[in-house]
Image (tube, coloured by chain):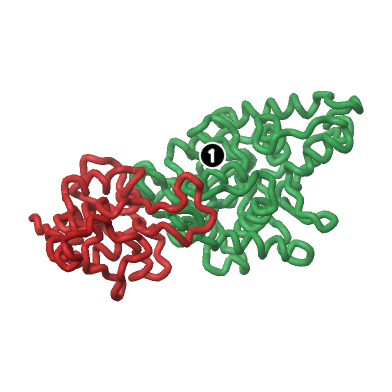
Chain colours: A green, B red
Amino acid sequence: MRVSIAILAMALGATGAYSGEDASLTLEDGQSLTIRTDAPPHTENLSEITSGWVYRSDETQALQLDDFDNPAFVFVDQGIDLYAAVDGSEGKACASCHENVEDFAGLRASMPKVVDGELVTMENLVNNCRTERMGAEPWKWSGGQMTAMTALIGLQSRGMPVNVAIDGDAAPFWEAGKELYYTRVGQLDMACSNCHEDNYGNMIRADHLSQGQINGFPTYRLKNAKLNSSHGRFKGCMSNIRATPFAEGGDEFKALELYLASRGNGLSVETPSVRN
Amino acid sequence: MYRILTGAAALMIAGMAQAEPVAPSDVMFDDGTVAASLTGVAGDPVAGRQVAMNRKLGNCLACHVNSDMSEQSFHGEVGPELDGVADRWTEAELRGIVTNSKMMFEGTIMPAFYKDAGYTRILDDFAGQPILTAQQVEDVVAYLMTLAE
């Protein structure tokens, strides 16, 4: 399962700690991780989409190059233990029904998606299994158990292109997410787009603004030394601009997650990524 | 070079007796500029420099390079450099930009620093108040007016 990533090519003419803008990622087995590619047609204001990895310092980038250096794998290992652990009234573990976690290859790349008219995220799938099949308590959306599990399941899709559906049943959720993306909120009166569409690549104080792609979530952040859910990150952004965050797992953040995932259609799943 | 304009003229127009600053909703814009002092009290450029630097107040360095604060590390590059702003803008223009830059630049990312209503989902802790007080705006404008090249 552990795949080492190596820098194939370092920057030409790049400077300082940010040579990564021209770096590329290649898996040990020769498979290239797509960290930049043409924007999908529905991302009308971008011509190219880029992974958040591109905007990180050389030192932070390096941590994602090898799974033995990647601090997120401590939590992936916890996820492996949780996967096998029996919990709840039915005496089942994840592994009781899903013998090989590898069978989840491809799932992360398609999430979130609409099932029976409802927008469903990876966390919803995990908790649905826990409450409906295992007779166990649901896990907290951004808690350590949940992020360990979503990292383990997401890892099975690493290297696969993100490809969430935005049409059919998904269309109204996608539209709602897009609306949120462009709505200014908080005392600083900013929308996601102000920083992550209009200003990616620029420094905002010491931080290098990315496109806000979510293809690497859950992501290990050096800032808090743990895995972070995408909804947890949305919450942080909203607080930073002095806005009242929506609830993790609520309709708004799920719609935003779908919309953001769709803006990354074509990038590789990087779960579990490392960011600052 | 210091080019500090006092608020004396505005104070006299207001009739000398007023002590209340202009409320955020009462600020008069003319093509994005604000000619009159918000307080009638001359801005203090030294205090304004501190307000501009403070991450919870002006936090100007988040987005703007400012050589006058070269002792501070990491200047943002989202907005134009502050070096020479006093050469490029008048005091009335700078007051308008700091108060609410959207009156001059539609769609700008820059927050309005003296606006207390009309926000969406504002955190309770900040509801009903502007980012800066009227005097802090005047102080920042006075400071910006010192940034000539």
Q: In terms of depth relative to the viewer, which is nearer, A46 or A235?
A: A235
* Residue occupying the far right of the picture: A90
Q: At which x and y percent is residue B33? A: 27, 70
Q: Is residue A219 left or right of residue A19?
A: right
* Residue occupying the far left of the picture: B1
Tell me which amino acid carries mark 1: Ala
Q: Is residue A40 visible?
A: yes
Q: At which x and y percent is residue A232? A: 59, 41
Q: At which x and y percent is residue A142? A: 65, 37
Q: At which x and y percent is residue A79? A: 71, 29
Q: Residue at x 27, y 57 (%)?
A: B21
Q: Secondary structure at mark 1?
A: strand
Q: Residue at x 84, y 36 (%)?
A: A131
Above or below for B68 versus B32: above
> Can you say which quadrant of the picture contains the N terminus of chain A?
top right
| Image quadrant where residue A227 sits | top right
